[in-house]
Amino acid sequence: MAHLPAQVAALTAVLAQSATALSLDGIAAHFSGRGAWKRRLAQIVDTLVALGRARVVGGTTYLGTQG
């Protein structure tokens, strides 16, 4: 996966397009790339939550938000 801004945009798009809440593994399954970005996935998703671009559902899954 590309640099941080592209990663954030891609994760935001996956969450926004999903009809159901996704786990971190479910989010990762949308991407074929391997490497260090997967270690940062939780941090990026937590950042999206803090910015109001995603929300936590049930403590372990995530949904995108409108906005």
Image (cartoon, rainbow, N blue to C red):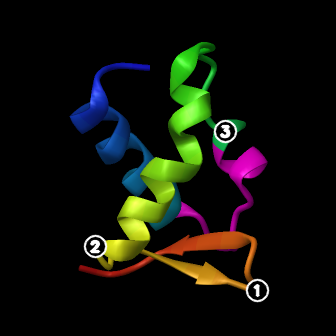
Residue at (61% x, 71% y) in the render: 62
The relative height of residue 26 versus residue 17 in the rendered view (above or below) is: above
Label 2 – label 3 distance at C-alpha: 20 Å
From the image, state whether disc 2 or disc 3 is nearer to you: 2
Q: Is residue 53 visible?
A: no
The reply to whether discs 3 and 1 touch (Cβ–Cβ < 8 Å) is: no
Which percent across, then down, holds residue 45?
A: 49, 57
Residue 38, image x, y percentages: 60, 30
Which residue has dot 3 on it?
28
Q: Which residue is mark 1?
A: 58
Q: Position of residue 25 (x, y in %)?
A: 77, 46
Q: Residue 23 colored magenta?
A: yes
Q: Label 1: how many residues lie within 10 Å, few (<14), some (14-19) or many (20+)?
A: few
Please, what is the three-letter code of the amino acid marked with disc 1?
Gly
Q: Nearer the viewer, residue 27 or 38?
A: 38
Residue 28 lies in quadrant:
top right
Q: Which amino acid type is shown beneath numbered disc 2?
A: Leu
Mark seen at residue 37: none
The residue at 67%/84% (across/down) is 57
| Residue of label 2 | 51
Q: The magenta stretch spans which residues? A: 17-27
SS type, badge 3: helix
